[in-house]
Amino acid sequence: MNKNVIHLIGGFMNVFEQKLAELTQAGLKRALPPIQHDGKWIIADNRRMLNFSSNDYLGLASDQHLQHQFLQKISENEPLVIPLTSSSSRLLTGNFPIYQDFERLIANRFQREAALLFNSGYHANIGILPALADKNTLILADKLVHASLIDGIRLAGVSFYRYQHNNLEHLTQLLTKYATQFERIIIVTESIFSMDGDIAPLTELVVLKKAFASQCHIMLYVDEAHAIGAYGEQGLGMAEVLSCIDEIDFLVGTFGKALASMGAYLVCDQVIKDYLINTMRPLIFSTALPPLNVAWTAFLFEQLPEFRRKRQHLALLSEKLKQAVQQKNSYPLQTQSCIIPFVVGENEQAVQKAKTLQQQGFYCLPIRPPTVPKGTARIRLSLTADLTTEELERLIVCL
């Protein structure tokens, strides 16, 4: 290889090494953890630790009874009619009956016209907004929406503003200023925010949507990633709790958290589904999820109403931990969910606190900027329904 080329490549490598050194110095360098799973336990560094960092909110991921039920159900069909791969985009040969059956089930449960499946929540959020937004669209997004939504907004290439977190007054000011300047405004939020565990004022957002309807076509986009399965009488998320499913134009949820699987969905009007099938690039140009994976998700989703006791137990654990953290931590807690932040401030403090908790038998992880604002590094305590009250009390003693 030419010496000049080698020198040039070496220069690029030095840039990457320097960036990594800077991340290390700031206490922000990440690495993939070498861990093993055993139900609600994590095994790492020769330690067996209770997992307080999982998004498996209902504790279904390691439920062997459910796994056996599912495997027995699909094994009744000989030969196997649910393949292990789709081998194609759904628009080519990768569409299977289980996808359409599941989409009908989702739409019926939410009592809406249509539902559409995606490979992940990230796929959904980086694809829907770019497909729907045009130069006559303004996006108003909550300041703390997930990175996938921020990326989707940027990919849309349209005008956007990020209103102060859950600040209805600021959002109203933006709507007042811009409602007559655009044909369509899409308000984007999560229902439960992943780092603080607080809840968006969905009812009030619906009121705002209606209040400005005469000036502009206002649409509401809500990501229920951390709510679906874990909240609501039927397990349909915060939109069910707050009785506003019908008012949300784009109701997105994921299957990789409480539903112990992989993928995502959009609940919407039929015309929106048809339009996305024709315009949404991550949907059009991706190999579809394995049909077996979709069948497992549908198997669990169908049983969501039956997991009511798990949701009740999760709520009790959440309230108990919230009260304990409030007593031990000066940071004002806004959480109304099973995500409880224990804020320590600086990056190194969060890393050290996590190490201490792990040494005491609790798999807790540090969350640092840019995931959270500077100066609010924390331990993100995430509860699951398979934890017992006694196990939680042991953690509380160690906080």
Image (cartoon, helix red, strand yellow):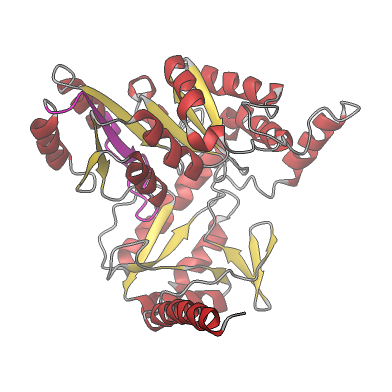
Quadrant in which the C terminus appears? bottom left
Q: Is residue 227 visible?
A: no
Q: Horizontal and vertical percent for residue 278? A: 49, 24
Quadrant in which the N terminus appears? bottom right
Q: Horizontal and vertical percent for residue 213? A: 18, 19
Q: Residue furthest right?
A: 78
Residue 184 against residue 23 in the figure, above or below: above
Image point 54% across, 51% down: which residue?
384
Residue situated in front as seen by the camera: 250 or 388: 250
Image point 49% across, 35% down: which residue?
281
Is residue 290 found inside the magenta-colored segment of the image? Answer: no
Residue situated in front as seen by the camera: 351 or 315: 351
Image point 22% across, 31% down: which residue?
204
Residue 211 against residue 87 in the figure, above or below: above
Is residue 182 found inside the magenta-colored segment of the image? Answer: yes
Q: Is residue 76 visible?
A: yes
Task: From the viewer's perspective, tell me whether residue 35 is left or right of residue 196.
Answer: right
Task: From the viewer's perspective, tell me whether residue 30 is left or right of residue 96.
Answer: left
Task: From the viewer's perspective, tell me whether residue 19 is left or right of residue 134.
Answer: right
Q: Which stretch appears magenta?
A: 181-203
Q: Horizontal and vertical percent for residue 55? A: 53, 51
Q: Horizontal and vertical percent for residue 311? A: 52, 40
